[in-house]
Amino acid sequence: MRKILIVEPFYERVSSFILPQFFSTFFETRDKGGSHKYLLDQLIPALKNSNFEVTLVTLPDKKWHWRARVSALQLRSKIPKSNFDVLLTSSVLPLAEFIGICPNLTAALKVIYFHENQLVYPVQEIKNRDVQYSYNQIMSALVADKLLFNSKWNFDSFLQNIPKIIKLVPDFKPAGLSEEIKAKSQVVHFPVKIPQLPTTKKSGPIHIVWAHRWEHDKNPSAFFRQLETIKSAFILSVLGECYEEKPKVFEDAKEKFKDKLVNFGFLPSKEDFYKVLESADIAVSTADHEFFGVSMVEAARFGCFPVAPNRLSYPELFPKRCLFNTESQLGKLLRNLVIGGREKLEKLNENIKKDVTRISEDKTVLQNIISALK
């Protein structure tokens, strides 16, 4: 039995424990810990079934910038002194520092799963935010034995921007880092687990859903502007995590589309969230910043026609007929889909669900991750 230590600085629970041999709980909620918790709550039972003894060490999912800077020190006292065969962590942990202060982990196979990367931001923004977050991730990548990225976009943007970060160093600039890191990297798409729901025949107006965090980087303004150009009948669900301070555009939209809204706000029950996706016809993303797009994959797996930007991870997930380059193209695509009706939508949607399932099906992806840990 191989011993694996999983260290996650951005998780819900604050504990360290050996998981029992027959551990099989799957936690359904994603409101805390986000994709980090969602991944591990699927992966841990699969590891147990693959003859791994799992030790999980975590910190709560808050104060991201502090976690990214000092989590190695915060976690040091929680790490068992025994030896492990494998260390799995996320890109939040400054791995180089962590290994330096936990020398018993030096010999372990060190694997990082990149949910995101900090190198993708514009140089000026990186300067303003402090280059340390990008530098930490480069250093972590150099220390690790294997790197797993949740999308090709995440992988490519990380490698392509390493020279941009190194260029900020005033002298003695190291060379060849991108090539060194590329040699031990692979893309392993995020595992998405979808329950089987009873299917019902859809009727009535076309149902459009937007399901993302209520933040400016998801560009909700573009979505609502283009909805106004649709003159045909439709109904609308606006879902996703929202915080006390949210963009004003959401309150404006609540009033503007009050006659079309059937759902508005965060649904605490994942079952209710899935029911909305199952009832919808079109799922839209207008994101400016995204590394995978779990909610769009979930929607497509439930049969929604995905409408997304022709950038980020979306071109590797969806065919060209689903993608737009400009905001005006988004409006035109939405108008055509609504006017065309449900029968035309279903024809356009042919094979999309199957292709997205092939990329993201949880059991297949989890086995790919486990293979990388051996």
Image (spheres, helix red, strand yellow):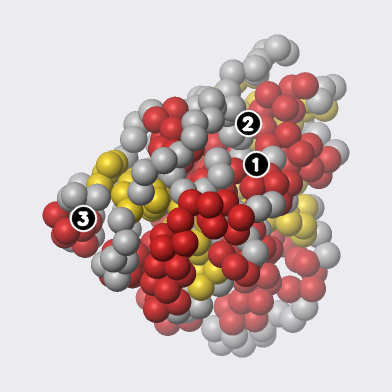
Q: Amino acid at mark 1?
A: Pro
User: Badge 3, how many Cα within 10 Å: few under 14, some, many 20+?
Assistant: some
Give how far across and how far down residue 270 sits, in percent: 43, 31
Select label 1 or label 2 by which is in front.
1
Residue 266 visible in the shown view:
yes
Q: Quadrant of the C terminus?
A: top right
- Mark 3 to mark 2 CA distance (whole Å): 37 Å
355 lies left or right of 169: right
Of 175 and 44, the residue lying toward us: 44
For the point 82% across and 22% down, the residue is 51
Give how far across and how far down residue 238 sits, in percent: 32, 49
Q: Provide the residue designation for mark 1.
A: 191
Q: Provide the residue designation for mark 2.
A: 42
Kindly indicate whether the residue at mark 3 contacts the one at mark 1 (C-beta within 8 angstroms): no
For the point 31% across and 49% down, the residue is 235
345 lies left or right of 138: left
Q: Amino acid at mark 3?
A: Phe
Kindly indicate whether the residue at mark 2 contacts the one at mark 1 (C-beta within 8 angstroms): yes
Of 358 and 143, the residue lying toward us: 358
Quarter location, residue 267: top left
- Mark 1 to mark 3 CA distance (whole Å): 34 Å
Q: Provide the residue designation for mark 3.
A: 257
Question: What SS does tag 2 mark?
Answer: helix
Residue 66 visible in the shown view:
no
